[in-house]
Image (cartoon, helix red, strand yellow):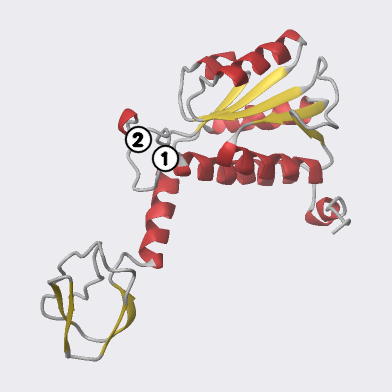
Amino acid sequence: YWIEKKKQQNSSFLTKNNNLNRKKLLIDENKLLNYNKNNKTINIKQETIIERSIYMGFKENEKTILKDLETVLDKVDQKSVDEAMDLINSSNKIFFNALGRAAFAGKSFVMRLMHMGREVYVVGETNTPNFEEGDLLIICSGSGETKQFIQIAEKAKGFGGKLMVFTGTPNSTLDQMADVSIIIKAPSKNQKDSEFQSVQPMASLFEQGILISGDAIVLGLMEQGSGNDEMFSRHSNLE
């Protein structure tokens, strides 16, 4: 943890203290503030800082997350995105399956497809109909190896359907089974097994990547015909 330093002033220094509970410091110009807690001292001399946290602030965290997203989304293959849009346009019904935070992000994507007039269902819900030839199954799986997803994908393919996958693992089982894969090269839940490291915990970056790439696909589909007014006309009104 650290405090933002301004280049124009003389050096500032901060002794880490993990026991501090996001204390706020109010520092006037050219004043020296000593904060003692648990026999540790913070000495700060800066220009003017108002309500600076001794922990990395919100703005710095925001920049870190956006930089991570830019890094992984720049690697998403445009050809795969075009193929995904073609698959969505040519499908009859669309089915979705995922777990955890990836499911929340993926449901946001298929909700927009519903707003565009597509017939969308979530696997496992009581009102989900049968899967048929010409239907599309969309799965989100960071590892691409979740057994229950593989089993469901095998069934969908066996019924003559198509498979679209959001995954962080190229050449995984689901990637190889898919008609099209959106590869989001973000860390897996166990980051030490991943090529790219993020300060964000577990699979947060992958889950964020699903949301942003899904919205980018929706914008691409909107360019082919659907407008905001038409989509809003399908917004839930039992609220």
Crowd class of label 2 (few under 14; some 14 to 19; many from 20; radius 10 Å): some
Whether label 2 touches label 1, CB < 8 Å: yes
- x, y (%) of residue 80? 57, 28
User: Dot 2 corresponds to which residue?
Assistant: 191
Evaluate whether residue 73 shows in this view: no
User: Dot 1 corresponds to which residue?
Assistant: 202
Mark 1 secondary-structure assignment: loop
Query: Horizontal placement of 150 versus 209: left or right?
Result: right
Query: Horizontal placement of 169 versus 236: left or right?
Result: left
- Number of numbered discs overlaid on the protein picture: 2
- x, y (%) of residue 11? 11, 75
Compared to residue 65, the image places residue 79 above or below, namely above
Compared to residue 163, the image places residue 41 above or below, namely below
Give the residue at x 60% y 16%.
150
Q: Residue furthest top?
A: 158
Mark 2 secondary-structure assignment: helix
- x, y (%) of residue 88? 73, 30
Give the residue at x 46% y 44%.
204
User: Please, what is the three-letter code of the amino acid marked with disc 1?
Assistant: Met
Give the residue at x 40% y 66%.
58
Q: Nearer the viewer, residue 218 or 139?
A: 139
Query: Horizontal placement of 226 versus 210: left or right?
Result: right
User: Please, what is the three-letter code of the amino acid marked with disc 2?
Assistant: Gln
- x, y (%) of residue 43? 14, 78
Q: Quadrant of residue 125?
A: top right
